Amino acid sequence: MKIFDFEYNVGGILKPKDLCVKNYSSKDVTIKKFPDGEIYVRVIPPVENENCIVVKSIYNNEELIKTLLTLNALKKGGAKKIYLVAPYLIYIRQDKIFKKGECLSAEFVLNEIKNYADEIFLVNPHIPFNFYEYTEYKGIKFYGIDVSYEIAKYFMARDPKVMAPYCSINLTDPKVISPDDGAINLAKRYSEILTCEWNYLNKIRISPTRVIIENKDLKTKRFI
């Protein structure tokens, strides 16, 4: 197994635990950028007949191209199976058509990735997903990883001494607030873990960079 992680020490974490990591390869990808903006990618061989995992947070257009070129290089190199683990994946927010003529970017990007990756793992994606099992969206299967508990645990302790390793803020009787109705299910999940109340804000989008939040009495000064 070869792990290509761009921002995370995944292989370094797994190898000491002996979790079936037979072959660990960190950042064995050469990436260059030409003056005109084109990206060059070369995966250091050999990857033939290897199970390859790419761990990449895809947060802008350039990172998307880097990832697609990396996946393509692995496939061209004869990798046995290719897995993509994306803590964040750009363009997933447009998972519905709201106005005639719009591009369904979530479907487009997932289809492009699926051309090269055998399995796709997404961390709390914007698309509604099944916790820790496969979800099918527009005929494309991906595995949804929920990290709600890992995030919520930063706020679980009420004792500042217990809280210190996780967070410098001590919250007493907090309330989980969703920024809009689209994240209500996530807010509910956090509130269940933290055993506290939840609420949501009413958001009206004016443009890609401007939103209006309606006034709402949240009845608390401590919220997450």
Image: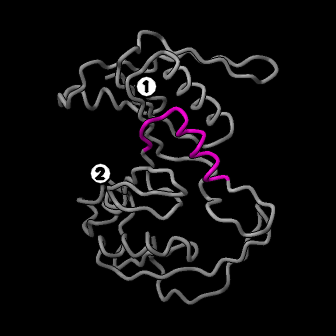
Taking the spot 42% from the left edge, 57% from the top edge, the residue there is 135
Q: The N terminus lies in which quarter of the figure? A: top left
Mark 1 Cα-neighbour bin, 10 Å: few <14, some 14–19, many ≥20: many
Mark 1 lies on a secondary structure that is strand
Identify the amino acid type marked 1.
Phe
Dividing the picture into quadrants, the one containing residue 66 is top right
Is label 2 in contact with label 1 (beta carbons under 8 Å)?
Answer: no
Taking the spot 56% from the left edge, 14% from the top edge, the residue there is 42
Taking the spot 65% from the left edge, 86% from the top edge, the residue there is 215
Please state the horizontal and vertical placement of residue 145, each as a whole percent of the image: 37, 53
- Return the residue nearer the eye: 115 or 163: 115
Please state the horizontal and vertical placement of residue 103, each as a whole percent of the image: 74, 55
Which of label 2 and label 1 is nearer to you? 1
Please state the horizontal and vertical placement of residue 124, each as a whole percent of the image: 45, 56
Mark 2 Cα-neighbour bin, 10 Å: few <14, some 14–19, many ≥20: few
Residue 165: image tag: 2
Residue lying farthest to the left in this orientation: 18
Which residue is the site of mark 1? Answer: 4
Q: Is residue 217 left or right of residue 187?
A: right
Magenta range: 105-120
Query: Within the magenta stretch, is there residue 193?
Result: no
| Picture layout, residue 74 above or below residue 19 | above
Residue lying farthest to the top in this orientation: 45
- Separation of residues labelled 2 and 1 (CA atoms): 29 Å
Please state the horizontal and vertical placement of residue 177, each as a whole percent of the image: 49, 75
